[in-house]
Image (spheres, rainbow, N blue to C red):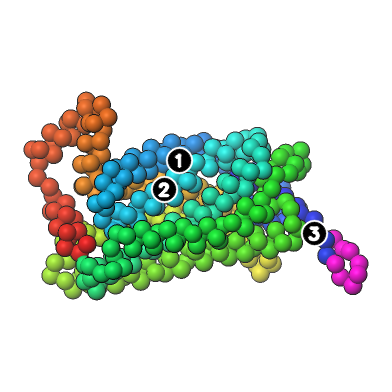
Amino acid sequence: MAVAHTAVFELYTDGENSTFEYNYGNDMAPSVCDDEGISLRTFQPVLYSLIFLLGVSGNGLMTTVLLRRRHHLRITEIYLLHLALADLLLLFTFPFDVVNAAAGWLFGEFLCKLTGLVQNLNLHCGSFLLACIGFDRYLAVVHAIPRMQSRCPKTVHRTCIALWLVCLGLSVPNAVFLSVKEVGGQVSCFYHDYGIHANNWVLTNTVLNHVCFFIPLAVMSYCYAAVVVTLCRSQKSQAKQGAIRLSLLVTLVFFFCWLPYNVTILIKTMVDLSVISQQACEHYILLLSVLDVTKSIGLSHCCLNPFLYAFVGVRFRQELIHLLCEEGCSNVCSPFLRAQGHSRPSISDRATTTSTMRIQ
């Protein structure tokens, strides 16, 4: 959803000034390529609006339910609470992106810097929180560590706060380099100032995004591979499998949502750095189209976790129904309460409850 910009940087060599043009950014095409005809971007504001409505509703309900029993949260639920808060932060930047795509940036310098910081913060923090969930399941299942200092709630909260601070530190340069400027008759929020330093930060930030995705992904892959091997060898594999089902699903959704975008942006970075040669303008425009599609898929991830959690977590579904009843939605939740009263939990539901009590 970004607008293409060309930055002019000054170089100082042998006492003489020389200038050159360089295009940069996540959605930047070379100046010889005109991507204004890409119709996909017309539908992005509609898609972003839908993601915003679903995500705020789902993450808001999940956060409310978890905060109601904040003193009795399980380890995975603590991480999921922080994950929901990170997703809400990202979602609150969507209205700015929608307006920006339709009419340019209208919100001033401060909000330009703030939205850029929050978006980076969420992308970094979300992947590390999911890596922590995978590592916690690894300790609980593979090494059978039900109680240890690193798994007590206070330590988990401190770990999450430390992650927030580290990711905030990695995101602060975004607020420094972003600025508002009129380019080509349209006001935009982009890396206009600081010349070559802004360009270096764009490249550095791209590398950081890859590192903050692929390293947690490697951690999650190793942890869950070890968990699967352990479950296959365990006589109580079905019970333990129920306990980690939620964590595994959330991680897989993260993988399938964000991997295509990271692969695409990696290819585009190599094209921008001339590591891969650009054969034709049409190929670059196609790459930008794929980038838009994969970015939209990735951003949709922030509205999926609550629905996965509600679908898999029996305890969450029950507490959500009770919350709706307390808020005056008895006509909606009464049929579900009667169904719960006349039905027995499934094997997988009992496994989830039993194994959670054993390994947490």
Q: Residue at x 17, y 66 (%)?
A: 237
**CA distance separating discs 3 and 1:** 38 Å
Closer to us: 238 or 178: 178
Residue at disc 1, secondary structure: helix
Q: Residue at x 72, y 39 (%)?
A: 186
Q: Quadrant of residue 227?
A: bottom left
Q: Earlier in the sequence, mark 3 or mark 2?
A: 3
Mark 2 and mark 1 in contact (Cβ < 8 Å)? no
**CA distance separating discs 1 and 2:** 16 Å
Q: Residues within 10 Å of mark 3 (few under 14, many from 20)?
A: some
Q: What residue type is disc 2 on?
A: Leu
Q: Residues within 10 Å of mark 1 (few under 14, many from 20)?
A: many
Q: Nearer the viewer, mark 3 or mark 1?
A: 3
- Residue 18: image location, x then y, percent: 87, 63
Q: Which residues, given as a range, are shown in magenta?
A: 12-20
User: Mark 1 sits on what residue?
Assistant: 51
User: Mark 2 sits on what residue?
Assistant: 85
